[in-house]
Image (cartoon, rainbow, N blue to C red):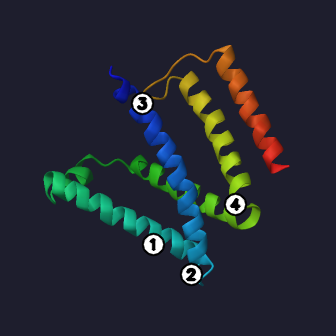
Amino acid sequence: MSDMTALAPILLALAGGASLALQYAVMLAVTERGVGVTSALLINSVIGLIVLGGIETYRGGPQFVIEIVARAKPWFVVPGLLGTFFVFAGLYGYKHQGAAATIVLVVAAQLVTGLILDGMGLTGAARSIGTETLLGAAFLVTGAFLVVR
């Protein structure tokens, strides 16, 4: 594996984290201009649907919708529900406790949940959880406590 291939997921995760922090700041500004929280969430989702629909249409034509529907299972709605809740919780947190406290709590919860999922072998890159990993997680959770305090 080349250095760039190994570095790409790290850079993408960092960029994703930064974009998430910025997304909440912009969405909070939207709500402060009289648009309700659910409307801000709707705008966020509609824009995402338009962009992703455009990409899929470009990649394979409009029949991608038929292919998705043919393969769909009722539980396919769960990620959308979780994602919507995640964005709502972050936006609510920004408004009521600020960016830093919200972000550190989200990251701590993601880390603990991620460790559990990795430990159960439920992720694509599952690995064993060693002492160093647990120590790092403990430091992060302790840091989250200190930031929120």
Give residue 115's position: percent from left, percent from top: 61, 28
Mark 4 or mark 2, which is nearer the start of the sequence?
A: 2
Mark 4 or mark 1, which is nearer the start of the sequence?
A: 1
Say which residue label 1 marks: 43
Distance from the alpha carbon under mark 3 to that under mark 1: 33 Å
Residue appearing at x 49%, y 22% in the figure: 126
Q: Secondary structure at mark 3?
A: helix
Hey, what amino acid is under mark 2? Val
Tell me if mark 3 has few (under 14), some (14-19) or many (20+) residues whose alpha carbon lies within 10 angstroms of its own.
Answer: few
Q: Residue 93, labelled with which disc?
A: 4
Give residue 65's position: percent from left, percent from top: 22, 57
Query: Disc 1, disc 2: CB below 8 Å?
Result: yes
Q: Nearer the viewer, mark 4 or mark 3?
A: 3
Q: Which residue is farthest right?
A: 149
Give residue 4's position: percent from left, percent from top: 35, 29
Mark 2 or mark 3, which is nearer the start of the sequence?
A: 3
Q: Is residue 55 left or right of residue 61?
A: right
Hey, what amino acid is under mark 1? Ile
Say which residue label 3 marks: 7
Q: Secondary structure at mark 2?
A: loop
Mark 1 or mark 3, which is nearer the start of the sequence?
A: 3
Give residue 1's position: percent from left, percent from top: 33, 19
Hey, what amino acid is under mark 4? Gly
Q: Is residue 57 left or right of residue 23?
A: left
Q: Nearer the viewer, residue 51 or 124?
A: 51
